[in-house]
């Protein structure tokens, strides 16, 4: 399906004359929505950028991620994950993808700004994409999370590798670390498995890609953020708390 206008509200030529661009499917720079359904934890192409300028020269385009909601974990333009801004060249009649990755189920949105030049003209447009449906994989099965005795150790009990986020004790609050390829059924540590600091912080909660909710350590006190000393016994939590449960403790 197509996002109405797809591109720019104006084109400014060398002579300084501003020409209005009709907002329709044949806009000079097309933004075509390829899908509105994304699987949690998987990078999925949701928008296609197309250069429809009648010019043999390439369109030099800067794409800036102006904003995302809490569900969108990453925006990738033309396979570039450069943070907030990507620069690319698009030939006449050619297209480049915009992909997103969601970290939980829900309705996602993100906003992009496009600034470019082609054939002596400059173009600019900001577009917000709404109602992207992020869904959990139907074959995601998990029997629980084992919180090992001592600091930082956890085991994800399931049959296949997965992406996961861990929330861990840090200063007076919590830190968060993510890995997109986490081994299962073996003890996982922050430093080795989640690119986190070797700070001895205890993992107090785990969010697994494609699984609704957050697994919380049974001894985690959500009221005043006290984490009792380990009892020396492994703890297993098989029930999840609602998504967003730990928002007040994380950035």
Image (tube, helix red, strand yellow):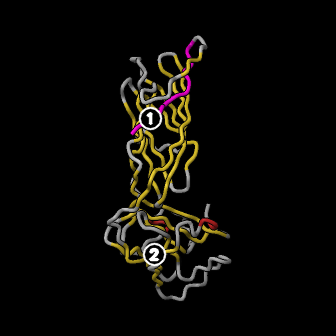
Magenta region? 1-14
Query: Is 229 part of what is drawn in magenta?
Result: no
Q: Does residue 124 lie above or below 196 as drawn?
A: above
Q: Along the line of sight, which residue is nearer the eye, 157 or 26?
A: 26
Q: Which mark is residue 154?
A: 2
Graded by Cα atoms within 10 Å as few (under 14), some (14 to 19) or many (20 or more), the crowding at tag 2 reads: many
In the displayed structure image, the side of residue 44 where residue 240 appears, left or right: right
**Secondary structure found at label 1:** strand
Residue 60, given in percent of the width and then of the height, sits at 47, 26
Is residue 130 visible in this depiction of the protein? yes
Magenta stretch, main secondary structure class: loop
Residue at image position (57%, 72%) is 201
Residue 233 x/y as whole percent = 48, 88
Residue that mark 1 sits on: 31
Residue 2 within the magenta-colored segment of the rendering: yes
Q: Which residue lies at the image location 40% right of the left edge and 52% below the top edge? A: 37
Residue 118 position in % (x across, y down)? 48, 20
Image quadrant holding the C terminus, namely: bottom right
> Residue at horizontal 39%, vertical 61%?
181
């Amino acid at each position: 399906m197509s996002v109405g206008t797809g591109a720019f509200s104006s084109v400014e030529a060398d002579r300084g004359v501003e020409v209005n661009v009709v907002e329709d499917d044949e806009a000079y720079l097309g933004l075509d929505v390829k899908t509105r359904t994304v699987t949690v934890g998987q990078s999925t192409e949701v928008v296609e950028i197309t250069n429809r300028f009648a010019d043999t020269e390439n369109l030099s385009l800067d794409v800036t991620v102006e904003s995302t909601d809490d569900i969108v974990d990453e925006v990738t333009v033309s396979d570039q994950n450069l943070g907030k801004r990507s620069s690319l060249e698009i030939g006449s009649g050619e297209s480049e993808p915009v992909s997103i990755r969601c970290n939980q189920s829900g309705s996602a949105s993100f906003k992009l700004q496009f600034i470019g030049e082609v054939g002596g003209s400059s173009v600019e447009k900001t577009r917000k994409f709404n109602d992207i449906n992020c869904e959990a994989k139907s074959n995601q099965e998990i029997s629980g999370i084992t919180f090992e005795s001592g600091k930082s150790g956890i085991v994800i009990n399931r049959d296949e590798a997965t992406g996961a986020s861990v929330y861990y004790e840090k200063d007076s609050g919590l830190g968060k670390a993510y890995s997109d390829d986490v081994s299962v059924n073996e003890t996982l540590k922050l430093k080795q498995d989640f690119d986190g600091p070797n700070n001895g912080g205890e993992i107090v909660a785990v969010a697994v890609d494609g699984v609704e909710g957050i697994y919380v350590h049974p001894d985690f006190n959500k009221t005043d953020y006290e984490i009792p000393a380990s009892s020396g016994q492994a703890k297993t939590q098989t029930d999840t708390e609602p998504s967003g449960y730990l928002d007040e403790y994380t950035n």
